Image (cartoon, rainbow, N blue to C red):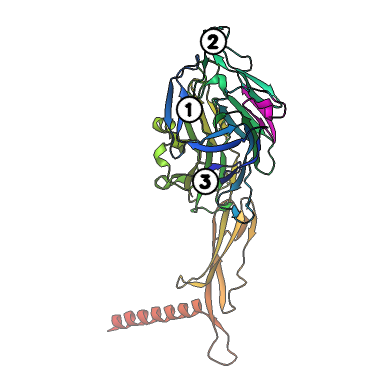
């Protein structure tokens, strides 16, 4: 069975899974078999403190954990999952072999429920002596269950289910009876017939357990009655260096674990130390933007790992150059909100005229709460963007104001030394003056201006060359003399 785009690995990448049922073993003297189905409802016992047969059914839809029904009739089998990067697996129909790029999965959890059928013959040849139960086969696992055989109601003599550790797994040892000795077999998720298994140290993104029994079936899903810890957020930036006036983008990513269904399967009624409501009370993603940057508020985005716009789940507030994306209450109580990585993308613009800055630092923070617990705060690693400065050198004709040659632009970091020259200006130009900052230390964008005059050769062979400004001076002198002569002549008349 292939299930696509169904989870996220430890790298934050979308993954596909391949599920296999294999190594089916029939019990002696029986034509045993196993079946696998996917349920479209979650059956939950209405009261965890008693083995009531009253069940509430919660519907399953897109975004819900898959509830597997694994059934055994005098047999056992291995249930395995291999995790692949989404879209990379290939199935060879001839050999039945699946290959692809493995995802990064080292930890898996799952809840097993409806473990309630003891054995009749207890043969040592059968898996766990024929008791209904399961055993992990890979990694290292911890299994949580009704370890103390805590009776569901009042401690009556027969009124208890008894799970046991056996053969490195968990199995039912005795069934439940009422005070009259009549067996009660509730069909639903109930603490006394459930076990939570946490598995770590997986290799090659491969997970496997064995399940078996005599005329029995379990519900199995990747969920937990306890909360998943939220991982610290990650921070990235799409550039490493910028100039004043440049636009770039910060991204804060946060995976939201699937704590939605923990509320439905919570055993808080029986174990008060567990959460009654595992869903988040609040989640906010905060990013304080450096004062040298301008936030492009209109282009802030929030998308999930499928690049689907998820802004509808958040209210975005901007105050004192801080972006705060706050999950809405309706989102926190919506199953579609969970099991996703959200990417808060913040475009910013470097202010003009920034000076004496080496790096622009940035750290984001995610704050979350569950029930009345103190807020859990995680900071991202700091990301730094280095600021570069431009040195622009212009070469002008002093008379016309036009550039003699194209400007030269070089880049420096804060505190670098610089020098300039006009070696590339042709010999027909004579240096006149400059802006006075032809060398020094860079602490901001710097503009250096050089001014020149054109040099002309005299028309007479061997004559002395003259400069344009000299020609202009001579022309002005001639005009002055003409005006003077005209005025003097007028007076004589």
The residue lying at 60 percent from left, 73 percent from top is 424
The residue lying at 55 percent from left, 6 percent from top is 156
Q: Earlier in the sequence, mark 2 or mark 1?
A: 2
The span shown in magenta is 123-144
Residues 89 and 332: in front is: 89
Residues 33 and 340: in front is: 33
Query: To which residue does mark 2 refer?
Result: 181
CA distance separating discs 3 and 2: 48 Å
- Check residue 149 for magenta coloring: no
The residue lying at 48 percent from left, 80 percent from top is 471
Label 3 vs label 2, nearer the camera: 2
Crowdedness near tag 1: few (<14), some (14–19) or many (≥20) residues, C-alpha within 10 Å: many
Label 2 vs label 1, nearer the camera: 2
Residue 225 picture location, percent across and down? 54, 25
Q: Quadrant of the N terminus?
A: top right
Task: Describe the element under mark 3 as helix, strand or loop.
Answer: strand
Q: Is residue 20 above or below residue 141?
A: below
Residue projecting furthest to the left: 493
Task: Describe the element under mark 1 as helix, strand or loop.
Answer: loop
Crowdedness near tag 2: few (<14), some (14–19) or many (≥20) residues, C-alpha within 10 Å: few
Would you say residue 13 is visible in this rendering? no
Q: How many marks?
A: 3
Residue 5: mark? 3
Residue 39 picture location, percent across and down? 48, 35
Report the side of 247 relative to 107 (left or right). Answer: left
Query: To which residue does mark 1 refer?
Result: 279
- Check residue 129 for magenta coloring: yes
Report the side of 259 relative to 438 (left or right). Answer: left
């Amino acid at each position: 069975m292939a299930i696509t785009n169904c989870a996220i690995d430890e790298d934050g990448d979308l993954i596909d899974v391949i599920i296999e049922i294999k190594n089916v073993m029939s019990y002696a003297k029986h034509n045993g078999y196993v079946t696998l189905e996917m349920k479209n409802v979650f059956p939950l016992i209405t009261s965890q403190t008693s083995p009531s047969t009253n069940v509430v059914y919660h519907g399953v839809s897109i975004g819900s954990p898959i509830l597997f029904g694994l059934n055994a009739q005098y047999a056992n089998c291995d249930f395995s999952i291999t995790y692949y990067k989404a879209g990379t697996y290939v199935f060879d129909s001839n050999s039945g072999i699946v290959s692809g790029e493995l995802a990064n999965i080292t930890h898996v959890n799952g809840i097993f429920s409806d473990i309630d059928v003891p054995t009749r013959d207890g043969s040592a040849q059968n898996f766990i002596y024929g008791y209904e139960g399961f055993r992990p086969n890979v990694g290292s696992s911890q299994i949580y269950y009704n370890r103390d055989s805590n009776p569901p109601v009042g401690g009556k003599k027969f009124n208890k289910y008894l799970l046991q550790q056996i053969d490195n797994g968990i199995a039912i040892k005795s069934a439940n009876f009422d005070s009259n000795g009549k067996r009660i077999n509730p069909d639903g998720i109930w603490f006394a017939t459930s076990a939570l298994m946490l598995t770590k140290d997986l290799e090659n993104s491969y997970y496997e357990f064995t399940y078996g029994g005599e005329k029995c079936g379990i519900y199995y899903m990747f969920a937990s009655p306890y909360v998943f810890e939220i991982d610290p957020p990650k921070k990235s930036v799409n550039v490493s260096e910028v100039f004043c006036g440049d636009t770039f983008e910060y991204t804060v990513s946060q995976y939201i674990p699937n704590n939605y269904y923990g509320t439905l399967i919570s055993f808080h009624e029986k174990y008060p130390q567990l959460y009654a409501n595992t869903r988040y009370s609040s989640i906010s993603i905060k990013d304080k933007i450096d004062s040298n940057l301008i936030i492009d508020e209109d282009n802030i985005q929030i998308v999930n790992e499928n690049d689907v716009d998820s802004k509808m789940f958040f209210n975005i507030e901007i105050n004192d150059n801080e972006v705060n994306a706050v999950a809405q209450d309706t989102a926190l109580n919506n199953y579609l909100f969970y099991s996703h990585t959200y990417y808060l993308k913040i475009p910013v613009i470097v202010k003009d005229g920034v000076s004496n800055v080496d790096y622009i630092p940035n750290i984001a923070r995610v704050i979350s709460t569950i029930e009345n617990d103190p807020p859990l705060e995680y900071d991202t690693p700091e990301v730094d963007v280095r600021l570069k400065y431009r040195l622009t050198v212009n070469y002008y004709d002093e008379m016309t104001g036009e550039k003699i040659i194209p400007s030269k632009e070089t880049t420096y970091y804060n505190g670098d030394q610089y020098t300039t020259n006009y070696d590339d200006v042709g010999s027909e130009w004579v240096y006149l003056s400059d802006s006075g900052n032809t060398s020094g230390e860079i602490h901001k964008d710097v503009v250096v201006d050089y001014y020149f005059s054109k040099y002309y050769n005299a028309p007479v062979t061997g004559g002395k060359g003259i400069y344009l400004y000299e020609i202009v001076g001579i022309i002005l002198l001639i005009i002055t003399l003409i005006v003077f002569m005209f005025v003097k002549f007028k007076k004589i008349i």
